[in-house]
Amino acid sequence: MATLTAITRYPIKSTAGEALNSAEVTEEGLCRDRRFMVVKPDGRFVTARTHPQLQRVTARFDGRYLRLLCDDQTALDASRDHFGEQRFATGVWADDFEAFTTTFALDAWFSRIVAEPVHLLWLGERSARFRETIGTRVSFADGYPLLLTSTASLADVNARTDGTHVMAQFRPNVVVAGVDAFAEDAWRRIRIGDVVFRVAKPCARCVMITVDPATGRRRTDGEPLRTLSSYRNQGKDVMFGQNLIAENPGRLRRGDTVEILE
């Protein structure tokens, strides 16, 4: 039987994930998922593709207070009440939209982490980013509200590579157990808990999956991207996981049955 074995949200794009026992799902994805993003002064977004040390940052956001931790950096707490809320032009890939400034202290904290001047932006209570191609609002995520992977698919990758890779390298929101490797490729609609999801498209992977989440450093052997590229190609893209769009709001809980509707 297919079951939901893990739920993870990422309060800040490209930083470490937060494991959850349950989560609310909205049109934009998991509640409080990717509500913050690090950007350069001109608004271009900064991720672990170019700054892998971001994955050493642990963030917790309860909707009112943000707490940051990273190695020997002094922990930083910030209240939503102190965010500047000045509109700031930014974008993710081809989508241009506006978000909000936070505080000078948050900007300075992240500037030390990435060793260059940056700002930390807040998406706001409601995302200004509406993606016409999928007909929904989206957070600071790359392109879709949620990402699904399966434990069997990761096991298949590990069986083909040297060493052991962990699911955190692929940064999913939901992980399914009890299915065959890459069974998710054939799914079109599924139900998990209260929520029906449209399985929109496979997720194209990049160098970011070669970052070790424990160290914030990129592997020198190019794995697991190198191995995936030998058997998981679609055209020029290397695929692992499936992007999801929720058809209704609801709650997910670890242990929920995953029902394949189509």
Image (cartoon, rainbow, N blue to C red):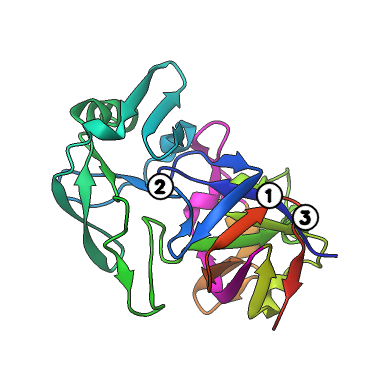
Q: Is residue 187 magenta?
A: no
> Magenta part of the protein: which range?
194-223
Q: Earlier in the sequence, mark 3 or mark 2?
A: 2
Q: For the residue labelled by badge 1, is the local secondary structure a helix, a strand or a loop?
A: strand
Identify the residue under disc 2. 13
Mark-to-mark CA distance, 3 and 2 = 26 Å
Mark 1 highlights which residue? 6
Which amino acid is tagged 2? Lys
Q: Secondary structure at mark 2?
A: loop
Q: Position of residue 252 (x, y in %)?
A: 64, 56
- Foreground tag (2 vs 1): 1
Neighbour class for label 3 at 10 Å: few (<14), some, many (≥20)? Answer: some
Q: In the image, what residue type sits under mark 3?
A: Ala
As rendered, which of 217 and 73 lies closer to the eye? 73
Q: Is residue 91 left or right of residue 222?
A: left
Would you place residue 63 above or below residue 96 in this image? above
Residue 196 vs 76, above or below: the answer is below
The residue labelled by disc 3 is 155
- Residue 218 part of the magenta segment: yes
Q: Check the picture and name the quadrant holding the C terminus.
A: bottom right
Image position of 133 with respect to 68: above or below:
below
Where residue 255 appears, as percent x and y from the top left, is 77, 53
Give, as a three-letter code, the residue at label 1.
Answer: Ala
How far apart, in angstroms, are the residues tagged by discs 1 and 3?
15 Å
First in residue order: circle 2 vs circle 1: 1
Q: Is residue 51 left or right of residue 152?
A: left
